């Protein structure tokens, strides 16, 4: 039966705990791989090419774009970030469900190219929890916090184009919920039409007395 | 949060064990209700009106049709069978997921009226298992068995219009899989747009310093 990997996109308000959720998911279940982005930003101390990021020059990154070797890319704070097509497709071919933590624009670009992709939107249980988390880091001014909150709200525009909502109230519960949604996606009928058609042929042949 | 019940339609090759699966599902998890059909056929011994079926005269059934009080109906072996709208909607309003075991035509009619309905198609693990089950009852002639098999194949026409496939190899596993698919459906983003919009408003108000 078809057990080709699924492209899982995780988005949500910043501060909602997407990173922790995704990390825990890959620890808890073997079937997942985290996508590794290509970027033009400089490696920070301890970062390794091909582990945290694929570090590329602007020239190299430009070539990746022109050769359509990124499933999506964006410019953020003056640096480019993109998702390498080769890496994503190799993981899927090997039957691994590959997780991308990206925003709406990239998510929709990917859904166009991979209609089977699963778009998940992570929500806080309530507004207060989100505000507390956003303020909780304690290192920023009130003004900076307001800017970040404003940005968090912007990230939730277009949410109706996602497939499912996951509430991150309890980490383990949320992780299992995401896992359940991925498993559901594996059961989409469109992924199994060959299997169904084959069984139908075999049964039909028998009914005809062949 | 929205926990309105979901309409779950279970179809599949006859002989695949849909009935057992659905029965076990309602025993194992509290959240389900089985739909009760209205029918014009006579009650058999031990059957009770409102438990196995709603028993109706042809005249009464005709009125149900004309008043659009059936979500679907069909004629089978000279008797009418239909799904009462009142009953289904009352269960959903109470937050119960309601299960209908019906065929393609009815399933599609329901999907038109309730786009949120979940259409599941149950498959045997392989053709041989299905053939063994169909023959296994041991009470029919080879000719009757071939007819039933032919009919089983017909029931799988239009399968690509269903949402998910469930393989019934191990009963408990298949039951949990169906349950997982229903739980996934509860997380569809379209069911939670009010919740998301409310949180967004609250966070936005804060970002503006209100």
Image (cartoon, coloured by chain):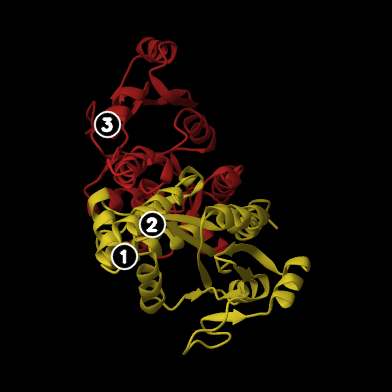
Chain colours: A yellow, B red
On whether disc 3 and disc 1 are found on a single subunit, the reply is no
Chain for numbered disc 2: A
Q: Is residue A114 left or right of residue B118?
A: right
Determine crowd level at label 3: few under 14, some 14-19, many 20+ residues with C-alpha closer than 10 A.
Answer: few
Circle 1 sits in a helix, a strand or a loop, which is it?
loop
Q: Which callout, 1 or 2, points to the residue nearer the camera?
A: 1
Q: Are marks 1 and 2 on the same chain?
A: yes
Give how far across and how far down residue A75 sits, in percent.
60, 63
Q: Please give the label number shown on residue A148.
A: 2
User: Gap between marks 1 and 2, in whole Å?
Assistant: 10 Å
- The subunit letter for the residue under badge 1 reads A
The reply to whether the C-beta atoms of the residues labelled 3 and 2 are less than 8 Å apart is no
Label of residue A205 in the image: none
**Quarter the N terminus of chain B occupies:** top left
Question: Which of the two discs, 1 and 2, labels the residue nearer the N terminus?
Answer: 1
Q: Are marks 3 and 2 on the same chain?
A: no
Residue drawn where x is 57% and y is 61% of the image: B127
Question: Secondary structure under badge 3?
Answer: helix
| Front residue (pair A75, A7) | A75
Q: Which residue is mark 1?
A: A140
x and y, in percent, of residue A184 in the image: 45, 58
Label 2: element kind: helix
State the separation of the CA atoms marked 3 and 2: 39 Å
Does the residue at mark 1 contact the one at mark 2 (Cβ under 8 Å)?
Answer: yes
Residue A83, position in %: x, y?
Answer: 61, 69
- Seen at 65% across and 64% down, the residue is A71
User: In the image, residue A151 lies at what x, y percent?
Assistant: 43, 53
Which one is in front, A139 or B42? Answer: A139
* Residue ID at (40%, 48%): A153
Quarter of the image for residue B210 reads top left
Q: Residue at x 40, y 26 (%)?
A: B82
- For label 3, the residue is B93
């Amino acid at each position: 039966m078809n057990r080709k990997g699924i492209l899982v996109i995780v988005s949500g308000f910043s501060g909602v705990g997407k990173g922790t959720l995704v990390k825990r998911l890959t620890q808890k279940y073997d079937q997942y791989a985290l996508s590794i982005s290509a970027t033009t930003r400089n490696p920070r101390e301890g970062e390794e090419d091909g582990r945290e990021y694929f570090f590329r020059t602007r020239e190299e990154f430009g070539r990746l774009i022109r050769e359509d070797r990124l499933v999506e890319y964006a410019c953020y704070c003056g640096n480019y970030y993109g998702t390498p097509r080769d890496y994503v497709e190799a993981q899927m071919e090997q039957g691994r469900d590959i997780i991308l933590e990206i925003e709406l624009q990239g998510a929709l670009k990917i859904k166009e190219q991979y209609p089977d992709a699963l778009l998940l939107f992570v929500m806080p249980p309530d507004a207060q929890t989100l505000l507390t988390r956003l303020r909780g880091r304690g290192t920023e001014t009130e003004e900076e916090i307001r800017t970040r909150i404003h940005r968090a709200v912007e990230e939730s525009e277009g949410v109706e184009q996602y497939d499912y909502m996951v509430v991150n109230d309890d980490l383990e519960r949320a992780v299992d919920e995401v896992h359940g949604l991925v498993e559901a996606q594996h059961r989409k009928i469109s992924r199994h039409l060959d299997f169904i058609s084959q069984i139908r042929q075999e049964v039909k042949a028998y009914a005809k007395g062949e």
